[in-house]
Image: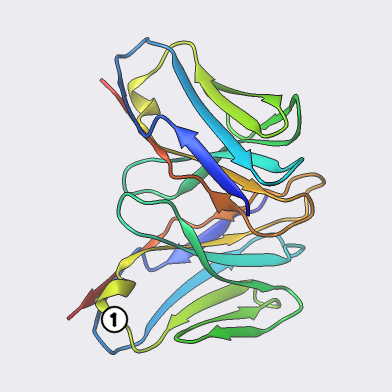
Amino acid sequence: SQTIHQWPATLVQPVGSPLSLECTVEGTSNPNLYWYRQAAGRGLQLLFYSVGIGQISSEVPQNLSASRPQDRQFILSSKKLLLSDSGFYLCAWSSQGGNTIYFGEGSWLTVV
Amino acid sequence: GENVEQHPSTLSVQEGDSAVIKCTYSDSASNYFPWYKQELGKRPQLIIDIRSNVGEKKDQRIAVTLNKTAKHFSLHITETQPEDSAVYFCAARGMDTGRRALTFGSGTRLQVQP
C-alpha cells in the first residue's frame, strides 16, 4: 500500500533563517505531488504541485520554493523565513490520472 | 482558475440532529468534488467524494449531492455524534491541463453538542 511521510513534524525557526521540509511517498511511482499550507484556523492553500521530476508549478508568489530531486521526493524550502510563513504545511500525493489526494501528517512551522 | 466558496464557517448542532454544509464552485468544467474531515492537529482525510456524472452519493450517515447546473454541492451528515466534531473542507478540481490539484473551500467547523 502507499504511504506518505513528511518531516519534521514541528519546527520553530527565527525570522530570516532557512527552511527545509521533506516529503517522500512509498508504494507508488510517478505520483503527482503537492505542498499545501494551512494558516491557523484557515483553509488549505495550494503552494506548489509537481507532475514529474524537476517539474514544479507555483500557485502563489512567495519566498518559498519547491524541488523534486527524485520521483517520490518533494522538498519545500526557503532561504529566509518571514513571520507570515508560520502555519501547518501539508505534503500530498495523487496517482497519475487519479482523483483522490492523500495528505501527509503535516509539519507545524512557527516563525519567531 | 477554480474558486470554491463554503458555508457556514461554523456550525453547532445537537447530537442526533442533521448537519448540512454547502459549497459553490466557479469552473463549470470541474468534474470531481471530494469532502475532507480534519480533526484538530491532524491531516485532512477524505470522507466522501462525487464525480460530475452523479447527482448523489451516500455512505452510511454521510451523503453528498451535486447540482451541476447551479454549480453547488452539499455534505449531509445525519444522526450526528460527538466524534463528528471536526473541520470539514469541500474541494473541486478544475480541468486545467496537467493540473490535478484540488481547490479547497475555507472550511466549516462542526461542533456536535452531546
B67 horizontally vs A30: left or right: left
What colouring style does the render use?
rainbow
Kindly state the secondary structure of the residue where label 1 is placed.
Answer: loop
- Report if residue A110 is visible in the image: yes
Quadrant (top left, top right, bottom left, bottom right) of the C terminus of chain A = top left
In the shown orientation, is residue B33 left or right of residue B88?
right
Q: Is residue B11 above or below residue B59?
A: above
* Residue beneath the point at 73% across and 66% down: B31
The image shows residue B54 at horizontal and vertical percentages of: 71, 81
Above or below for B38 versus B64 = above
Q: Quadrant of residue A34?
A: top right
Q: Quadrant of the N terminus of chain A?
A: bottom right
Residue B44 image position (x, y, % from top left) = 45, 55
Image point (80%, 44%), residue name: B98
Pick the residue in front: A54 or B97: A54
Residue A63 visible in the snapshot: no
Where residue B69 sits in the image (x, y, percent)? 70, 78
Q: Determine whether B8 is above or below A57 in the image.
A: below
Give the chain of mark 1: B
Residue sticking out furthest to the left: B114
Query: Label 1 is placed on what type of residue?
Result: Gln
Q: Residue at x 67, y 34 (%)?
A: A72
Q: Quadrant of residue B9?
A: bottom left
- Residue A23 at x, y = what percent? 55, 33
* Numbered marks: total: 1
Callout 1: few (<14), some (14-19), or many (20+) C-alpha neighbours within 10 Å? some
Residue at image coords 52%, 28% = A22
Residue, disc 1:
B81
